[in-house]
Image: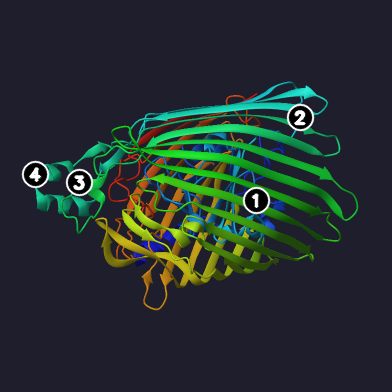
Amino acid sequence: MSPRLSLLALLLLSAAPVLAEEAPPADEQHGLVDPELIVTAPYARDRKLVATAVTVLQGDDLQRQLRSTIGETLARQPGVSASFFGPNASRPILRGLDNERVRVLTDGIGSFDVSNTSVDHAVAANPLLADRIEILRGPAALLFGSGAIGGVVNMRDLRIAREVPEDGPHVDASAGYGSAAQERNLATAVNMPLGGGFVAHVDGSFLETGNYRTGGFVFSDGLRREAAKEGGEVAEDAQARGRLDNTAARTWDVGGSIGWIGADGANFGVAVSHLQNRYGIPNGLELGHEEAHAGEEEHAHEDITLNMRQTRVDVRGAVPLAGAFKEVKLRAGWADYRHDEIESDGAIGTSFFNKSWEARLELVQNNVDGWQGASGVQYFSRNFRAVGEEAYIPANETRQFGIFTLQEFDLGAVRLEGGARFEHANVQSAVIGRERSFNALSLSAGGSVDVGGGFRFALSGARTERAPAAEELFANGAHAATRAFEIGNANFAKERQLGVEAALRGSGADWRLEVSGFFNHFNNYIFLNPTGAEEDELPVFQYSQANANFWGVEVEASAKLGQLGSTRFNVTGLLDYTRATILNGGGAVPRIPPLRVIGGVEAVGGAVGGRVEIEHVTAKDRTASFETTTAGFSLVNASLSWKPFGTETATTVMLQANNIFDVEARRHASFLKDVAPLFGRDIRVSVRLSF
């Protein structure tokens, strides 16, 4: 980070001591609960009092950030990046951690897909139907499994009704268009009261895109130079600009439920849904130098598409209790998932099958003299198999059983919290005759104290354990998405992490500031390590274990510049940075996002609002031995919103212009960064209706 950039960031953030927006009504029908309340837990928690960093995305902010994948929807939140395997497969990365270390949930239950096995596999979670998305870490993350060692992303939808509509049927709808990918999307949800506390729900969504248009060159400078050495057609192909071939998509989702809401708070509901998603994988550049780009030419000009289908059943219920306990809550789900990887001639190359189910039972305590909490049990089952030429992971089964607790103590100026989870995991593959069992114990504790002046200081620590996943234990074969021959290690030990996080939060009538820093030390950190060998014309990568350190900082700030009527004008700033190292000479952890700064001016609170911002991402030249560097970039974005029926309604019309100057931008965390840059100039129009 250059001194000049450091000074710019400090000036921006110190001059902008995110402004607490007026809390929307507690409207469960729309999910418009106070953004300072966290709902990803057995009971609502005050975000200001939680000991670790939490992000809440809803309402107009969610509409502004909404994209076709959960990863891209969240990619501009503090501490969050995304894998971006083209516009159709993008999974969240939290503080440099991804895949097995981040759980993506749908209303508190897993997404039941195979997105953790490969970066080209999309998450089976539809952001178009999201009503609220929360990102959390720390003690609360232990509630959702040892796979949440990096954090939890919970996408809350309204598929199972939370309340009975008061005035007959209630409709939520949205529609949008994006120019860069010629994107058209539409989503609708209807809740119908049936009497006696029963509510029927139906929803559906549709999204279709063409090949997306990039800013600048399609292929990176390094690839263009290499192609120029070869000359001929490949050198000409390398100069491509504009749209990236084979990146179109068509997705649809439909669901329905029956729910019952009792007068005393009891509720129960069952939902059935079906998702279909067919999307292309960006083509590469065919180079003749096999030693430099082994395996890339095999799929360079083949139009590979993935055809995903998932049918799932969801259950949610709660029964109020008396005495020391407030209620008992049930959340369960089951899904049957399949996707086919289709070659350019229409033949199915590889098929992936996954059947999973998960159930959680939580006992919530009443608040007694400042002591509250929840405890529960959880069971998860996964049956996975792949068939075809790229089935590099043998058929396997995973079973996990966990017990957990989260406790909070309000001591006045000081609040304490702690979490614990014990989990037994069994991973086996009958095909290769291997079975492993692990017992993982995770503990977390933290607290916050009022330090005056509107500020609160929080400190937390965690000792977590994660059992290796089947992919890390049993992989053995060519993986086209990563362009590597991947080999697992069935003898792995548990991955352990010891971490600490400090946060300072402050807010006043016209300002808000949140600064957090973290340090995580891993024992037996699992990562892909190049061996230098070659198999099937692909470089061999062996899953390995070593100690590693992760540390970083995140800053959010906002201050009021002025007010005109009900419209407030704010200046805002965001900064995040993560640095990760494999110890004992291992060097940099690959695909760690670089330093990012976002500064903006916005108008909020009135019927007409808007925002103009600059996002600067620095160059990434601290890389693993097998990585290439990534150039920095700056994007200018703007948006204008209008609430035609008043500020108290959810109905909003929004016009956006993203990457206004059509800059060539590449995300370092992406496996395809050299052949698939981010979107070029993208004009987006969206409408959100509620009546």
The first of marks 1 and 2 along the sequence is 2
Answer few, some or many: residues within 10 Å of disc 3's Cα (few below 14, many 20 plus, some between 14 and 19).
many
The first of marks 3 and 4 along the sequence is 4
| Residue 223: % across, % down | 20, 52
Vertical placement of 45 versus 530: above or below? above
Q: Nearer the viewer, residue 354 or 25?
A: 354
According to the picture, the residue beneath numbered tag 4 turns out to be 232
According to the picture, the residue beneath numbered tag 3 turns out to be 286
| Residue 406: % across, % down | 72, 60
- Quadrant where the N terminus sits is bottom left
User: Residue 286: in sight, yes or no?
Assistant: yes
Q: Nearer the viewer, residue 571 or 272?
A: 272
According to the picture, the residue beneath numbered tag 1 turns out to be 509
Q: Secondary structure at mark 1?
A: loop
Asked if the residues shown at circle 2 and circle 3 are in contact, with their CB atoms under 8 angstroms apart, the answer is: no
Q: Secondary structure at mark 2?
A: loop
Vertical placement of 103 versus 581: above or below? above
Image position of 463 (left or right of 674): right
Task: Select label 1 or label 4 by which is in front.
Answer: 4
Name the residue type under label 1.
Ala
Q: Secondary structure at mark 3?
A: loop
Answer few, some or many: residues within 10 Å of disc 1's Cα (few below 14, many 20 plus, some between 14 and 19).
few
User: Residue 628: in sight, yes or no?
Assistant: no
- Quadrant where the C terminus sits is top right
Image position of 459 (left or right of 99): right
Answer few, some or many: residues within 10 Å of disc 2's Cα (few below 14, many 20 plus, some between 14 and 19).
many
The first of marks 2 and 4 along the sequence is 2
Q: Could you tell me how far apart the alpha carbons at marks 2 and 3 are, in whole angstroms? A: 58 Å
Image position of 377 (left or right of 656): right
The first of marks 1 and 4 along the sequence is 4
| Residue 69: % across, % down | 47, 41
